[in-house]
């Protein structure tokens, strides 16, 4: 990377300050524990301000085209920018990174692909606020380090834009509430860019659950189990090692959403059920220090760090309907990748990442199966394939990362905005799916005691409504 000492210094400072605040959010957990314990007050949801209304079931205004502004052009943001520009009826009008050279590189690449050249913003940590003043940005996609998401997502809403924010939308409970309040006040949607919720197996699992294949759902198990050790210690991957630094700050489940969200969707969380309590366990932090000992030279800056986050952090979550969800997070141990995706009920069970079939899943449901033996998932995946995958699966596999689910997320987001539909994933889903981050910190700080999970919908969770399991619909023709 070219020498940009001033920018680097400010980014580091911004990172340290924002990270410190976020860590403090986790750290002040103890104070919140008292009022957030199951034996504490029954209602932990702040009242909605007078005159404010929910964003549940609020459709987008119809957009002829969707004009996207991107903040954060590292590994994720630069790849996703190409995905946005490939979706019919979508244009990337502006790109921003604190490192101006990254904005230039992404703009150059889009132009070389024959796409309209986006305007570049960069050079300071608040350059994105200038981008937010543009009239020709409808949707802001945010792919910066976690510590910036709350501020940038809120700023996008306050500027009158809709926001699609990478995981997590925020790391503290107060920040999550603030995003809910800001979305309601500004009447703009803030969505979590939860691409795995659009995975082909995850959506088939959702449809099987809703079709009653598993009987009454009783439990689910998901996670983010990804050996990131090499990337965490790389000097060229995560900018300024932002992700490794989170492991020096707090003991918490830092990123459980990819595994939790599809299970919560199948259980109709916020749409008939809700997450009520969470208790967390954490193993000792061993993996990162052990890796550093074996593979990282003593001169490396990481040797000044102490890793405090447990390698495997497990959240055990109860729902109002008496179901349980186990959500795991481990990025610091040697192991093959898995999001687990297991869902079970009175009539059967599905498990992903387990079978030898081409779809990678295995299943056992009555009355189809008996004899205590797992069966191949492939025929079920075909039968319960979500309409999004039968419609655009080929485009997705050609255009997007992560097996195509990134493109499905992007195509669907653009379709929702162009057709004036209700978001599949709203601010309430985003908030509750990210809440295990601060809540696991609270629970662990209290010796693993259960803590209450706030009801971000303020009571509306009892109402059934579609989420990701929608009826087929068309992308409006490109003007
Ligand atoms: N959904 C997924 O599958 C998926 C996959 C990878 C990453 N992510 C998420 O994407 C986000 C980014 O991860 P990454 O791997 O791309 O990290 P990265 O370090 O490669 O990129 C982050 C970028 O943000 C820029 N940035 C920092 N502060 C900024 C500011 N104030 N204004 C503008 N730009 C700023 C940095 O310069 C950098 O280019 C994270 O939230 C991560 O969790 C999601």
Image: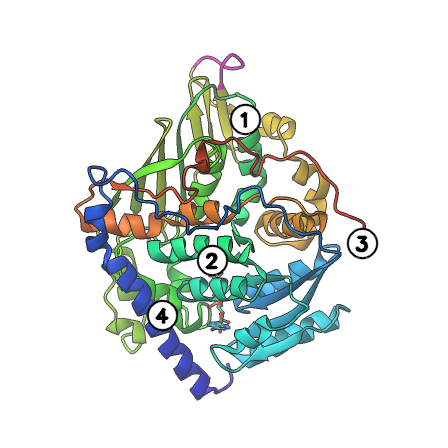
**Residue under circle 4?**
18
Q: Residue 478 got which mark?
A: 3
Identify the secondary structure beneath mark 3.
loop
Residue 354 higher or lower than 157, as above or below: above
User: Alpha-carbon neighbours of circle 2 within 10 Å: few (<14), some, or many (≥20)?
Assistant: many
Q: Which mark is residue 210?
A: 1
445 sits left or right of 373 in the view: left
Spatial CA span between label 3 and label 2: 32 Å
Residue at image x 50%, y 66%?
155
Between the C-alphas of marks 3 and 1, the distance is: 33 Å
Is residue 359 in view? no
The earlier-in-sequence mark between 4 and 1 is 4
The boundaries of the magenta stretch are: 365-371
Q: Which label lies toward us, 2 or 1?
A: 2
Give the colouring mode of the picture.
rainbow
State which tag comes first along the sequence, 3 or 4. 4
**Left or right, 361 with reference to 232:** right
In the rendered image, residue 58, in percent from the top left (x then y), is placed at 59, 45
Q: Which mark, residue 182?
A: 2
**Some atom of ligand 1 lies within 8 Å of the CB belonging to the residue at label 3:** no
Residue 336 lies in the magenta-colored region: no
Q: Nearer the viewer, residue 205 or 271?
A: 271
Q: Position of residue 201 (x, y in %)?
A: 55, 36
Label 2: state its secondary structure: helix
Check disc 4 and report its element: helix, strand or loop: helix
**Magenta region's main secondary structure?**
loop
Discs 3, 4 touching: Cβ within 8 Å: no
């Amino acid at each position: 990377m070219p020498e940009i000492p001033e920018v680097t210094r400010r980014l580091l400072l911004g990172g340290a300050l924002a990270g410190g605040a976020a860590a403090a959010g986790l750290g002040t957990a103890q104070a919140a524990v008292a009022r957030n314990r199951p034996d504490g007050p029954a209602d932990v949801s702040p009242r909605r301000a007078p005159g404010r209304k929910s964003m549940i079931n609020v459709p987008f205004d119809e957009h002829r085209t969707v004009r996207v502004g991107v903040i954060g052009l590292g590994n994720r943001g630069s790849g996703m920018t190409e995905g946005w520009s490939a979706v019919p009826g979508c244009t990337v009008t502006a790109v921003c990174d604190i490192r101006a050279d990254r904005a230039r590189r992404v703009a150059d690449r889009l132009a070389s692909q024959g796409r309209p050249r986006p305007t570049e913003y960069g050079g300071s940590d608040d350059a994105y606020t200038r981008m937010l003043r543009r009239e020709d940005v409808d949707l802001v996609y945010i792919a910066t380090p976690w510590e910036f998401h709350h501020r940038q997502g809120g700023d996008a809403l306050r500027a009158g834009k809709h926001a699609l924010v990478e995981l997590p939308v925020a790391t503290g409970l107060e920040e999550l509430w603030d995003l809910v309040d800001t979305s309601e006040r500004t009447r703009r949607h803030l969505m979590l860019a939860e691409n795995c919720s659009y995975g082909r197996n995850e959506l088939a699992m959702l449809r099987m659950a809703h079709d009653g294949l598993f009987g009454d759902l009783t439990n689910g198990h998901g996670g983010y189990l990804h050996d990131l050790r090499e990337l965490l210690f790389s000097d060229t991957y995560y900018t300024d090692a932002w992700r490794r630094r989170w492991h020096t700050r707090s003991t918490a489940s830092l990123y459980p959403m990819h595994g939790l969200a599809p299970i919560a969707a199948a259980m109709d969380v916020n749409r008939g059920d809700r997450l009520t309590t969470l208790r967390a366990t954490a193993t000792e932090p061993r993996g990162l220090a052990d890796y550093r000992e074996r593979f990282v030279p003593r001169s490396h800056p990481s040797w000044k760090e102490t890793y405090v986050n447990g390698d495997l952090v497990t959240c055990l979550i109860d729902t109002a309907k008496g179901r349980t969800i186990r959500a795991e997070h481990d990025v610091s141990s040697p192991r093959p990748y898995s999001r687990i995706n297991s869902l079970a009920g009175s009539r059967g069970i599905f498990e992903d990442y387990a079978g030898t079939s081409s779809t990678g899943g295995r299943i056992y449901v009555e009355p189809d199966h008996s004899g205590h033996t797992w069966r191949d998932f492939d025929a079920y995946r075909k039968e319960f394939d979500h309409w999004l995958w039968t419609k655009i699966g080929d485009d997705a596999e050609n255009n997007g990362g992560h097996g195509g689910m990134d493109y499905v997320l992007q195509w669907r987001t653009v379709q929702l905005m162009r057709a004036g539909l209700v978001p599949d994933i709203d601010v309430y889903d985003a908030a509750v799916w990210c809440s295990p981050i601060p809540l696991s910190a609270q629970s662990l700080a209290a010796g693993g005691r259960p803590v209450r999970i706030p009801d971000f919908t303020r009571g509306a969770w009892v109402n059934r409504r579609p989420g990701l399991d929608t009826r087929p619909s068309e992308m409006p023709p490109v003007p």
